[in-house]
Amino acid sequence: MNTMSASIEQLTCVFPAFNEEENIGPLLDEALSTLGDFAPAFEIIVVDDGSRDRTAEIVRSYGERHPQVRLIAHPTNLGYGHAVRSGLSNVRGDAAVFIDGDRQFKIADVSGLLAKLNGAQVVIGRRIKRADPWHRLVVARVYHFVLQQIFGVLVHDVDCGYKLFSREVLEKIVPQLESRSAFISPELVIRAKLSGFEVAEAPVPHYPRTAGRPKGATPKVIARTLGEIWRLRKSLGRGRP
């Protein structure tokens, strides 16, 4: 069955990655074998955020064999938000999906997001059941409550690392982005809504990690995220979208 989207000539897939040497090869194999089902052409951007392992080396090797694969390498660890911004700033496709590089999502599930792109310009994955430890689920619940109270974000899974954007959205909001932390996910949604874009949600399965370690929900990351929430709230209060 042909599952290509008639409106997308080139689809970009962005993977932010930090110390994912065990995951990045299988992830690229999956992407290379799957993305051609959804568009006549595709590109894969891996943003290596200053990894201390072989993540960048593995991506370079794939790039030598597969012209669709591009590496953006940060010389030091700048943060998840910076990695997402670097990737989305270099998109060549008509639409772009960013997917966390830890293999807790399947590339094939982008079909559910693409199905909603015609009626919306942003489609957010909604994890059907989060395959995370209980303490991360507690942090996420509090986080969502705070975002709803401060910004009126009324989506179910605003920090899901599986999001699809039309090119017009990227051109409008990526230059505005400021976050270096995981707050980049809510910031993308907040700025898209403020700019008048339609935001939809699509259910996606979420799988347990099979390799590597989670990097979020540490005290340092939480502190940085809280600071960025406060700064964005202040800037929006001054009327700057």
Image: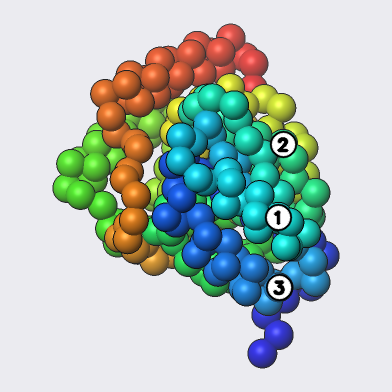
Q: Quadrant of residue 227?
A: top left
Q: Quadrant of residue 208?
A: bottom left
**In the rendered view of the protein, which quadrant contains the N terminus?**
bottom right
User: Helix, strand or loop at disc 1?
Assistant: helix
Q: Which residue is mark 1?
A: 63
**Residue at (55, 69) in percent of width and height:** 30
Whichever of labels 1 and 3 marks the residue nearer the N terminus, that label is 3
User: Helix, strand or loop at disc 3?
Assistant: helix
Whichever of labels 3 and 2 marks the residue nearer the N terminus, that label is 3
| C-beta proximity under 8 Å, tags 2 and 1 | no
Q: Position of residue 238 (x, y in %)?
A: 58, 9
- Residues at marks 1 and 3, CA–CA distance in whole angstroms: 17 Å
Q: Position of residue 131 (x, y in %)?
A: 28, 58
Q: Which residue is mark 2?
A: 89
Q: Position of residue 220 (x, y in %)?
A: 32, 21
**Residue at (31, 45) in percent of width and height:** 213
- Residues at marks 2 and 1, CA–CA distance in whole angstroms: 19 Å
Characterize the local packing of mark 1: few (<14), some (14-19) or many (20 or more) Cα atoms within 10 angstroms: some
**Residue at (23, 45) in percent of width and height:** 137
**Residue at (58, 22) in percent of width and height:** 178
The amino acid pointed to by label 3 is Gly
The amino acid pointed to by label 2 is Ser
Q: Is residue 177 above or below residue 212?
A: above
Q: Which residue is mark 3?
A: 36
Q: Nearer the viewer, residue 56 or 142?
A: 56
Characterize the local packing of mark 2: few (<14), some (14-19) or many (20 or more) Cα atoms within 10 angstroms: few
Q: Quadrant of residue 239?
A: top right
